[in-house]
Image (tube, grey):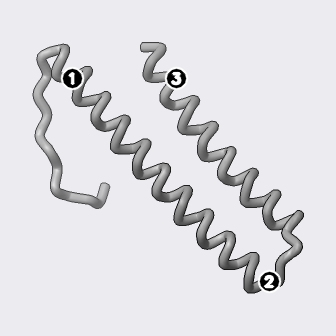
Amino acid sequence: MSERNDCGSFMGGLLMGGIVGALVALVLAPQSGEETRKLLKDKALELGKEISDQTETLKEKGRELLTRDGIEIEESTDTNP
């Protein structure tokens, strides 16, 4: 049970770290507006990839836990909630 809480805490910290990092970059950026927008776009893409990677890791861990407990799950092809 505590592993699940640890994953949630980690994901929350990752998200907050990304947001704080983006804000600090905006405030302290010595670049022009165009350069700052490009930097933000790049960081947003980087953060999105990291979140996607972490989501996949969490899915794998969830599958492992369910398999360990003898519960089978189907892979959903629907990407919309």
Instruction: Judge from the rendering whether residue 13 lies leftward or rightward of residue 11; answer left or right.
Output: right
Q: CA distance from mark 1 to mark 3?
A: 18 Å
Q: Earlier in the sequence, mark 1 or mark 3?
A: 3
| Mark 2 touches mark 3? (CB < 8 Å) | no
Please give the name of the residue rendered at 52% of the width and 23% of the height, measured from the top-left corner.
6
Give the alpha-carbon distance from disc 2 to disc 3, as whole Å.
Answer: 38 Å
The residue at which mark 1 appears reads as: 66
**For the residues marked 1 and 2, what is the alpha-carbon distance in whole angstroms?**
48 Å
Q: Residue at label 2?
A: 33
Residue pictured at 19% horizontal, 16% vertical = 68
Above/below status of 5 relative to 2: below
Residue 52, x across and y down, in percent? 41, 52
On the image, the x and y values in percent for residue 49 come to 46, 57
Q: Amino acid at mark 2?
A: Gly
Q: Secondary structure at mark 3?
A: helix
Q: At 12% from the left edge and 16% from the top edge, which residue is drawn?
A: 70
Q: Earlier in the sequence, mark 1 or mark 2?
A: 2
Q: Amino acid at mark 3?
A: Asp
Nearer the observer, disc 2 or disc 3? 2
Residue type at tag 1:
Leu
Sooner in the amino-acid sequence: mark 2 or mark 3: 3
> Which secondary structure lies at badge 1?
helix
With 58 as the anchor, is 45 left or right in this view?
right
Pointers 1 and 2 in contact (C-beta within 8 Å) = no
Callout 2 environment at 10 Å: few (<14), some (14 to 19), or many (20+)? few
- How would you rate the neighbour count of disc 1 (Cα within 10 Å): few for under 14, some for 14-19, many for 20 or more? few
In the rendered structure, find residue 6 and report the number of the disc placed on it.
3
